[in-house]
Image (spheres, helix red, strand yellow):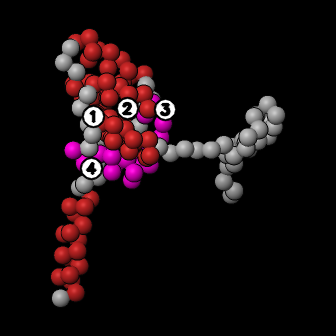
Amino acid sequence: MNMFLKSLSVLWLIPLLTLAIEPSNPNTICDRFVGDKDQQACEEKMKKDDVDWYAATVCSLTQEDSQFWSCWGKIKGARFNPVAIEVCAETKEMKDAERITCLDKARLERKPASDKSDKEDPKQYQPLLVKPPRR
């Protein structure tokens, strides 16, 4: 009986694992644009911009192109909490503004260890030294 319960719990776990957000393929994000000029501009941005592709997946769920570009501007160079970003993609009925607000909340903010600049304190950060293993 105990083995049966374990098997049953594993079967319940499988659907939960499949709910995870899948990142968009960068080549397909620009398919939302109809015009060649818009699609080409989008493809150029895909090549040069540093984005979190899970966040880009959330941006691709926006309905309006203007909201997509607004979202894209917010995710450029930013990093996000993967668990929080999943919530932004879960609901298909979410409005564009709500989705962008959700992304803002999922952003990871890293604060500097010190307010001093490197010029004031050049030893603020330790250099990384790789030492060979002892034999």
Q: Quadrant of residue 50?
A: top left
Q: CA distance from mark 3 to mark 1?
A: 19 Å
Dot 4: element: helix
Labelled disc at residue 62: 1
Q: Exactly how many numbered labels are in the figure?
A: 4
The N terminus, quarter of image:
bottom left
First-in-chain label (2 vs 1): 1
> Residue at the spot x=35%, y=25% of the render?
69
Dot 3: element: loop
| Residue 78 within the segment the image draws in magenta | yes
The x and y percentages for residue 90 are: 27, 49
Q: CA distance from mark 2 to mark 4?
A: 17 Å
Q: CA distance from mark 2 to mark 1?
A: 8 Å
Please state if 43 lies on the left or on the right of 132 as rendered.
Answer: left
Q: Which residue is mark 2?
A: 71
Name the residue nearer the viewer: 15 or 90: 90
Q: Residue furthest right?
A: 120
> Residue at the spot x=20%, y=14% of the render?
35
Q: Which residue is mark 4?
A: 90
First-in-chain label (3 vs 2): 2
Q: CA distance from mark 4 to mark 3?
A: 23 Å
**Amino acid at dot 2:** Cys
Residue 18 drawn above or below residue 69: below
Q: Circles 3 and 2: CB distance less than 8 Å? A: no
| Residue 2 within the segment the image draws in magenta | no
**Amino acid at dot 1:** Thr
Classify mark 3: residues with Cα within 10 Å, few (<14), some (14-19) or many (20+): few
